[in-house]
Image (cartoon, coloured by chain):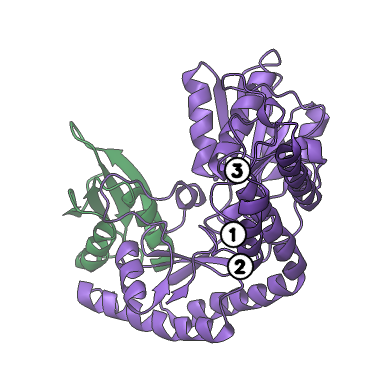
């Protein structure tokens, strides 16, 4: 099998496995305790915090580790809104944020808050002027992803951050798709990320709150992690996450260029060899490892199943079979074809030969599905 | 606007409404309007997107009386 869904999760990096095994022995104790084992765990945790802080352009004391990227987003959004309650109850978000952001905003609205959804263009990118134009006098928080998780479009975070700073509005950046793969945009007030997307273990999120940003926990009080994340820290998993991040950053310069070339090849070949298929997302300002396309007249979930049978694991933003689901809100906001959708996301384990084989198989599978549905040449 | 042809795709899921539209649009003369009745959420996206890919003119949607879904109106241009 060739695994092509790194944007969902990446297999554990060997450096993380090694660190995890060592940390299970060395870092099991309660880091809040003053005796030898506790101090050792605290020291290890602090080292991991410094590694992650360096990768995202933060100070170590600004970084905490929730149980997932989703929890990091929830705590980030709701905590920042709670901290700025006196400034107002309005939040501005892009229409293509991860569902974790949108669900946190829904919670805020159920609690009497307001929100503005900033539209994107056909490539999935927000217009910085439109985004800052959505800021109001009572805007307590703005949220913009570093890059889109479904189509790979990189957002103009620097411009939006400048606009937010001018208006005195904190900016939450969901950086889950970029940390460990390339530079993290500066200018965030709150940042969220997730370790299993850079080859770390599941169960480790990253929540960073810039010094001076008002933030109040939406959860019951707890002393752990500067009061930001309740509960006993998973020190071994955090250490493994930091080891994977260090390794991923070391490899990123060569790896990103390699994957970027492969994605460029996929974009070009799919457009050329699969008829009636639209490659979506920004062709230039995009993530190095992710590409998404939609095939006319094809059921996206059937395409996932057929590609799986052919030995390739991909994801789809379509929801033609499962009646409870709506089509992807990202594709909807972009106004592009939502059925027949496939997302391919690469990682260090994918070779050029794997990609070539995928590109040979894809047109055959699409043609077969179209033949079965009786839509060839329509 | 009275459509020259109504394609009933109610109760079908994507990509069927678009396929039915593609299958039937040739039945009306260029310049006429086809209405596609659909209650699948993807039709709202996919019918305008298909029009863009096939050089047809998407006119908009009208709500259906007393039931979920919409009539998506397309003028045949090609």
Position of residue A270 relative to residue A343, above or below, is below
Asked if the residue at tag 1 contacts the one at tag 2, i.e. Cβ–Cβ closer than 8 Å, the answer is yes
Q: Which disc, if any, is residue A152?
A: 1
Evaluate whether label 2 is on the same chain as label 1. yes
Q: The purple chain is which one?
A: A
Give the number of the mark in front: 3 or 2: 3
Q: Which of marks 3 and 1 is nearer the N terminus?
A: 1
Q: How crowded is mark 1: few (under 14 residues within 10 Å), some or many (20 or more)?
A: many
Which residue appears at 30% of the width and 48% of the height? B72
Instruction: Locate residue A5 relative to residue B30 in the image: left or right.
Output: right
Q: Mark 2 points at which residue?
A: A289
Q: Taking the image as drawn, is residue A198 in sight?
A: no
Q: Which disc, if any, is residue A234?
A: 3
* Residue A239 point in image, percent of width and height: 68, 52
Q: Which of A65 and A75 is in front in this view?
A: A65
Q: Earlier in the sequence, mark 3 or mark 2?
A: 3
The quadrant of the picture occupied by the N terminus of chain A is bottom left
Q: Which chain carries label 2?
A: A
């Amino acid at each position: 099998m060739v695994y092509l869904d790194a944007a969902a999760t990446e297999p554990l990096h060997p450096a993380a496995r090694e660190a995890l095994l060592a940390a299970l022995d060395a870092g099991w104790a309660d880091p809040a305790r003053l005796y030898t084992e506790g101090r050792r765990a605290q020291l290890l945790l602090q080292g991991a915090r410094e590694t992650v802080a360096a990768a995202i352009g933060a100070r170590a004391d600004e970084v905490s580790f929730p149980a997932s990227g989703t929890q990091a987003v929830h705590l980030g959004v709701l905590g920042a809104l709670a901290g700025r309650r006196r400034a107002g109850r309005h939040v501005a978000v892009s229409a293509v944020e991860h569902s974790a952001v949108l669900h946190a905003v829904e919670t805020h609205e159920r609690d009497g808050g307001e929100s503005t959804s900033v539209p994107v263009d056909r490539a999935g990118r927000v217009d910085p002027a439109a985004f800052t134009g959505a800021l109001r006098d009572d805007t307590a928080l703005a949220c913009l992803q570093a890059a889109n998780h479904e189509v790979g479009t990189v957002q103009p975070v620097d411009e939006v951050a400048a606009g937010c700073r001018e208006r005195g509005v904190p900016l939450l950046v969901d950086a889950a798709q970029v940390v460990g793969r390339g530079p993290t945009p500066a200018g965030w007030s709150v940042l969220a990320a997730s370790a299993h997307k850079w080859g770390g273990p599941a169960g480790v999120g990253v929540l960073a709150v810039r010094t001076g940003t008002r933030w109040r926990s939406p959860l019951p009080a707890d002393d752990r992690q500067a009061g930001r994340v309740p509960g006993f820290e998973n020190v071994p998993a955090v250490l493994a996450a930091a080891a994977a991040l260090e390794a991923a950053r070391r490899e990123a310069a060569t790896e990103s260029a390699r994957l970027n070339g492969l994605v460029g090849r996929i974009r070009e070949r799919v457009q050329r060899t699969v008829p009636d298929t639209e490659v979506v997302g920004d062709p230039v300002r995009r993530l190095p490892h992710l590409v998404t396309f939609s095939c006319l007249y094809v059921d996206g979930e059937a395409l996932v199943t057929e590609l799986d049978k052919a030995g390739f694991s991909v994801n789809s933003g379509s929801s033609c079979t499962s009646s409870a689901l709506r089509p992807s809100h990202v594709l909807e906001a972009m106004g592009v074809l939502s059925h027949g959708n496939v997302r391919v996301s690469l990682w260090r384990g994918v070779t050029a030969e794997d990609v070539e084989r995928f590109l040979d198989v894809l047109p055959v599978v699409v043609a077969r599905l179209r033949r079965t549905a009786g839509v060839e040449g329509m | 606007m009275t459509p020259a042809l109504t394609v009933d795709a109610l109760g079908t899921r994507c990509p069927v409404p678009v396929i039915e539209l593609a299958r039937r649009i040739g039945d009306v003369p260029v310049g006429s309007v086809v209405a596609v009745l659909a209650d699948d959420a993807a039709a709202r996206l996919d019918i305008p997107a298909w029009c863009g890919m096939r050089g047809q003119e998407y006119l908009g949607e009208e709500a259906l009386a007393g039931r979920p879904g919409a009539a998506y109106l397309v003028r045949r241009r090609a």
